[in-house]
C-alpha cells in the first residue's frame, strides 16, 4: 500500500470511528431525563438533579484523566487506548438497558468517565498519521465527524425511542460503538510507536534525559495560550445550548414554533462549524495561525453581538452561520497549531491537555450561561462577544506573527523531532 493510501486509510478509520461513536452516544443521552422518568422519578427537580449530575460527571472525570490516558498512549500506542475506550462504551451502553435506579445511571456515567477520551486520542491519531502539511486537514476532518455525529444522533435516537423504546435504544447505541471499534481494529495501522522510536539509535542516547513530562508539554511554544483559546471558544460555543430556545421565545415566536426554530438554528450552527473545521487546513497553508485565530474570533464576536439587538429570525440564521464557520475555524486552528508544536512522543499527552481545556469549557459554559441568563439572556451574548474580543487581542499580543504550523514540524524524521523539540525543553529540568 502506498504511503498516501496508508494515511488516508488510517484517517478514514479514526474519522469513521469518531463519527459513529459520537452518533451512538447522542442516540440516547439527550433523552436521559425521559429515561429517568421510566425509572420512577416524577418530581421535576429530582429529574433535573439526576440528569445534571449524570451528564456532568463523565466530562468532569474525563477532563481530569485525559492527559493521563494521553501519556499512556504516548508510551504504549494510541490504537490500544482507543480500543480500550470503545470496548468500555460497548459494554456500558448494554448495561444502561438494565438499570433500575437513578443512582445506577450516575454510577455508569462515572465509570464511563474513567475510560472515555477516545475523542482526544482520535485527534492525536489523525495528527500522527498525516504527512507534513496535512495535519490541520486531518484534525479538521475528525473534528467535523465529532460535530456531525451529535447533530444526527438525536434525530435517529428519537425515531428509535418511538419504535423500540428507550431501553432498547441503548442496545443500538452499543452496536454503534461496536462498529467504531471494528473500524479501528481492522483498518487503523499504528505508525511507529514512541517506544519504537525511542529504541532507535539516535533516541537511545540519553533517552531518559530527553523524556518529555507533563511539565515539558505545557512549556512548548504557545501551548498554554492555545489551551486558553480552546477553553474560551468552547465556553462561547456551548453557552448557546441552555438559552437559545428561551431567547427565541423572547423574540415573540409562538410556543409551538419555538422547538422547530431553535432546532434549525442549532442545525445551522453544527453544519457551518463543520464547514469551518474543513476549511482550516487550506487556510493554515497560506496564513499564520495568529492571523487566522484573531480574525475569526473577532468576526465571531461581531456575529454573536447581533443577538443582543434581537434581530429578525432571518438575520439570526445568517449571524449564527457566520458564528459557526468562524468558531469551527478557530477551534481547528488552535488544535492544529498546538499539535504542530508537539514532538511525536508527546502528541497524545498534549492532545489530552487540549481536550481537558475543551471539556472544562464544556462543563463551565452551561452553568455560567444559566446563571447569567437568570438576570438577562442578552447579557450572555454580550459577554460572549467580549470574551471573543479578548481572545483576539491576547492572541495578537502574545503569539508570534511568524509562527506557523508547518514551521513547527520541520524535522524530517521522528528521531530528529525528538532531538529538536525534546532536548531544549527538557533541559530546563536538568
Image (tube, rainbow, N blue to C red):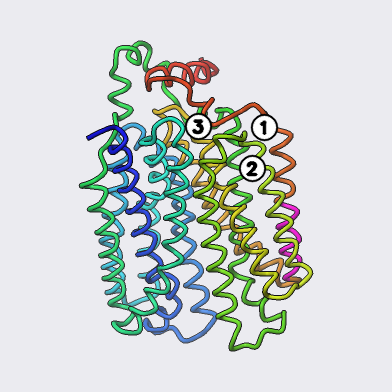
The magenta segment is 377-387
Q: Are marks 1 and 2 in contact (CB under 8 Å)?
A: yes
Residue under numbered circle 3: 340
Vertical arrangement, residue 117 with respect to residue 421, above or below? below
| Quadrant, the N terminus | top left
User: Residue at (72%, 63%) from the top-left corner?
Assistant: 381
Q: Which residue in the structure is indicated by mark 1?
A: 399
Q: Secondary structure at mark 1?
A: loop
Are dots 3 and 2 in contact, CB under 8 Å? no
- The residue that appears at 41% across and 79% down in the rendered structure is 36
For residue 186, the mark is none
- Image spot of residue 172 (x, y percent): 28, 70
Which quadrant of the view contains residue 229?
top right
Instruction: Rate crowding at label 3 as few (under 14), some (14 to 19) or many (20 or more) other CA atoms within 10 Å.
Output: many
* x and y percentages locating residue 39 in the rendered image: 37, 81
Which of the two residues, 37 or 379, is positioned nearer the viewer here? 379
Residue pointed to by mark 2: 293
Query: Secondary structure under badge 2?
Result: helix
In the image: residue 372, left or right of residue 194: right
Amino acid at each position: 500500500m502506498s504511503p498516501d493510501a496508508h494515511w488516508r486509510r488510517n484517517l478514514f478509520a479514526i474519522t469513521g470511528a469518531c463519527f459513529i461513536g459520537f452518533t451512538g452516544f447522542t442516540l440516547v443521552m439527550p433523552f436521559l431525563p425521559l429515561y429517568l422518568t421510566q425509572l420512577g422519578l416524577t418530581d421535576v427537580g429530582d429529574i433535573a438533579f439526576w440528569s445534571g449530575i449524570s451528564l456532568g460527571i463523565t466530562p468532569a472525570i474525563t477532563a481530569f484523566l485525559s492527559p493521563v490516558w494521553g501519556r499512556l498512549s504516548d508510551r504504549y500506542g494510541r490504537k490500544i487506548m482507543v480500543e480500550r475506550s470503545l470496548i468500555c462504551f460497548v459494554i456500558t451502553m448494554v448495561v444502561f438497558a438494565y438499570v433500575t435506579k437513578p443512582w445506577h445511571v450516575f454510577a455508569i456515567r462515572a465509570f464511563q468517565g474513567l475510560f472515555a477520551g477516545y475523542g482526544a486520542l482520535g485527534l492525536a491519531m489523525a495528527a500522527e498519521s498525516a504527512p507534513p502539511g496535512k495535519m490541520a486537514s486531518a484534525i479538521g476532518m475528525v473534528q467535523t465527524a465529532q460535530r456531525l455525529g451529535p447533530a444526527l444522533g438525536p434525530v435517529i435516537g428519537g425515531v428509535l425511542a418511538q419504535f423500540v423504546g428507550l431501553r432498547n435504544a441503548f442496545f443500538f447505541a452499543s452496536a454503534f460503538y461496536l462498529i467504531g471499534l471494528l473500524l479501528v481494529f481492522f483498518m487503523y495501522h499504528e505508525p511507529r510507536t514512541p517506544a519504537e522510536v525511542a529504541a532507535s539509535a539516535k533516541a537511545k542516547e540519553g533517552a531518559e534525559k530527553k523524556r518529555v513530562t507533563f511539565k515539558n508539554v505545557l512549556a512548548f511554544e504557545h501551548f498554554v495560550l492555545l489551551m486558553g483559546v480552546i477553553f474560551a471558544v468552547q465556553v462561547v460555543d456551548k453557552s448557546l445550548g441552555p438559552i437559545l430556545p428561551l431567547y427565541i421565545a423572547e423574540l415573540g415566536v409562538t410556543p409551538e414554533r419555538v422547538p422547530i426554530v431553535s432546532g434549525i438554528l442549532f442545525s445551522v450552527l453544527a453544519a457551518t462549524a463543520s464547514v469551518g473545521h474543513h476549511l482550516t487546513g487550506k487556510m493554515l497553508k497560506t496564513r499564520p495561525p495568529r492571523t487566522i485565530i484573531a480574525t475569526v474570533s473577532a468576526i465571531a464576536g461581531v456575529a454573536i453581538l447581533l443577538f443582543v439587538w434581537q434581530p429578525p429570525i432571518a438575520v439570526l440564521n445568517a449571524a449564527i452561520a457566520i458564528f459557526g464557520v468562524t468558531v469551527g475555524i478557530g477551534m481547528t486552528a488552535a488544535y492544529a497549531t498546538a499539535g504542530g508544536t508537539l514532538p511525536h512522543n508527546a502528541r497524545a499527552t498534549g492532545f489530552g491537555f487540549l481536550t481537558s481545556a475543551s471539556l472544562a469549557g464544556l462543563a463551565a459554559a452551561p452553568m455560567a450561561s444559566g446563571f447569567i441568563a437568570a438576570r438577562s439572556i442578552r447579557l450572555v451574548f454580550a459577554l460572549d462577544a467580549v470574551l471573543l474580543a479578548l481572545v483576539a487581542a491576547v492572541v495578537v499580543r502574545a503569539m508570534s506573527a511568524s509562527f506557523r504550523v508547518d514551521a513547527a514540524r520541520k524535522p524530517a524524521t521522528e528521531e530528529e523531532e525528538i532531538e529538536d523539540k525534546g532536548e531544549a525543553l527538557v533541559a530546563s529540568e536538568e
